[in-house]
Amino acid sequence: MENKYTGKTFIVEILAILLGLLFLVPFYYVISNSLKPFAEILTNTSALPKVFQFENYVNAFEKLNYLKVFSNSLIITVASNVVLVVFCSMAAYMLVRTKKKISNIIFMMFVAAMIIPFQSIMIPLIKTAGTFGLLNSIWGLVIMYLGFGSGMTIFLYHGFIKGIPKELEEAAIIDGCSRFGVFWRIVFPLLKPITVTIVILNSLWIWNDFLLPSLVLQNPELRTVPLATFFFFGQYTKQWDLALAALILGIIPLLIFFFSMQRHIIKGITSGSIK
Amino acid sequence: MNSQTKATNLQGGALQKNTNVSKPVSMASKKKWKDAGLFTLFVGPVLLAFTIIVLIPFFTGIYYAFTDWNGVTGNINWVGFDNFKYLFTEDKQFQASFLLTAKYTVVAIILTNVIGFALAILVTQMLKTRNILRTVFFMPNLIGGLLLGFIWQFIFVKGFASIGQITGIPLFEMAWLGDAKTAFWGIVIVSVWQGAGYIMIIYIAALQNVPQEIVEAARIDGANRWQILRHITIPMVAPAVTICLFLTTASSFKIFDANLSLTNGGPFKSTEMLALNIYTEAFVNNRYGIGEAKALIFFIVVAAITVIQVMYTKKKEVES
């Protein structure tokens, strides 16, 4: 078989590792420079820091109001995921199980809307959102994520629920369980694999999203991590010591999320894209 | 308001259909009512959010594209096709952005897919470090375009200058973001660095589905590595290629975050892609009507790409 580790494989391995290091170079630059005083960044950009000092982080942490923006991002991401999972799984279940024309029409509408790029509706959205009082509020933003994420989330749930046999539910209904109870006690637990995929895809999207929160959240107290980073960069242009530390602070939560759920993330992306 | 009527219509619609078939037995009619109520309860909330957030803005947006709305005053006048006429005859910046976005999309699709595929081949070899390498190649993809753009801003401005100083290679001594040509390639580098790992994951899944027996048989028949790649592997992963091509097309065409944070369209608007151009028109110049006309054109292009994709994939599915 080909599974032997030959000299040729060794050369390929060395090349692959070099390529991997090349991919990491930007991270090296940002991390090592975030630990240097400003003057050293300018004179010695490529070298490792002479002394590792975390002052930049302390400064950036304060100036970013990091705890606040981090918890804003966290609340928005968690709340949006909860409403997306709850309402979209319910809707998808009902649309699959109600064999009527109206179900098809509604489902097709959700799927068709996935085509619409955000930039093409952002201008009227702000007006409509204003009418409904959704601007400048975290909960307004969460409702917007429910609206924008519903297409893909319902689509993925719909495909998954179609593969679940109906017999289980029928048995439960005979036993006197309500439709509501059937869904939450019997169907929803079966959806766990696709729910994990959905939560991962939506979390990465919502956590990293910049444009929508920048249009909706005007109040500095409500800023999310990407928003705060953006304004920080604008305010401290060319103050690389602070800016780089702020960048790393923005990346750390993503890395923690990734390394704690790596396997699920890779699987989620594969199954999410193929559908 | 619309959404409310929508929900009741929906309920009524479901009911109407039911009453047509059901006999006027009170038990049965009660059940229909209950079903319609349940349907509304399950589907209603998300449909309501969807209507307010997506449907209403989408349709009012089409209307605004034909007006002179400035976003501030309530004065909105119908101007017919004037906005579109302006875009195609006078707005040179829009035309330049459109062409630039098209050019960028083509370049980004090719590079992201070629590099993503090469990485996938590399990390499906019998390497000891393949798992860690997959992680490394994928990692940039986690980070949003905005932060990535800032990271690379530092690399292009300070990192490259420093490498240039040490090595004396002229490529690194240039001011990459200060020149239209190199700034364009800067955006390409960032998006390929971000996107290749994502595409790699999809290609890995496809490569793992290539039956090893066929590869083995070809090897016994004397095929070399290149012939196996060309005549077995690539045809076997063709469906994944289609998926990846369209994924990268849609995402490249819609680029905004990295564009904003890396170059902000500069120098002198020379790297302003379409999405950023729409954003500036509406929220910086306060010309909402014209911005919305651009947004409508943008939508039509994206929709066309997606529809072609779906038709193509469906056709492939039928064939295979």
Image (cartoon, rainbow, N blue to C red):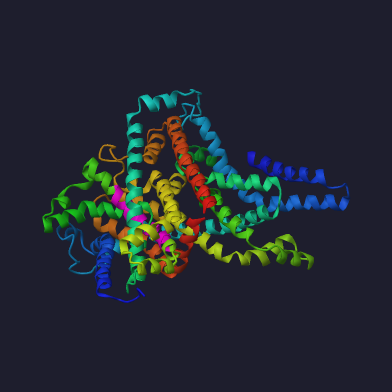
Asked whether residue A221 is in view, the answer is no
Residue found 65% across the figure and 63% down from its top: A164
Left or right of A47, for residue B23: right
Left or right of A119, for residue A176: right
Between B216 and B75, the one lying in front of the other is B216
Looking at the picture, how far across and down is residue B116, in whole percent? 35, 57
Residue found 63% across the figure and 64% down from its top: A188
Q: Relative to residue A88, is residue B50 depicted above or below?
A: above
Q: Relative to residue A126, is residue A95 depicted above or below?
A: below
Between A30 and B295, the one lying in front of the other is B295
Q: Quadrant of residue B182?
A: top left
Asked whether residue A252 is in view, the answer is yes
The residue lying furthest to the right in this view is: B25
Q: Relative to residue A20, is residue B293 depicted above or below?
A: above
Total label count?
0
The residue lying furthest to the bottom in this view is: A4
What is the magenta range? B187-204
Residue found 82% across the figure and 46% down from its top: B21
The residue lying furthest to the left in this view is: B168
Between B293 and A242, the one lying in front of the other is B293
Left or right of A196, for residue B154: left
Per the picture, the main secondary structure of the magenta-coloured stretch is helix
**Which of the image's four quarters has the N terminus of chain B?**
top right
Looking at the picture, how far across and down is residue A157, in whole percent? 59, 57
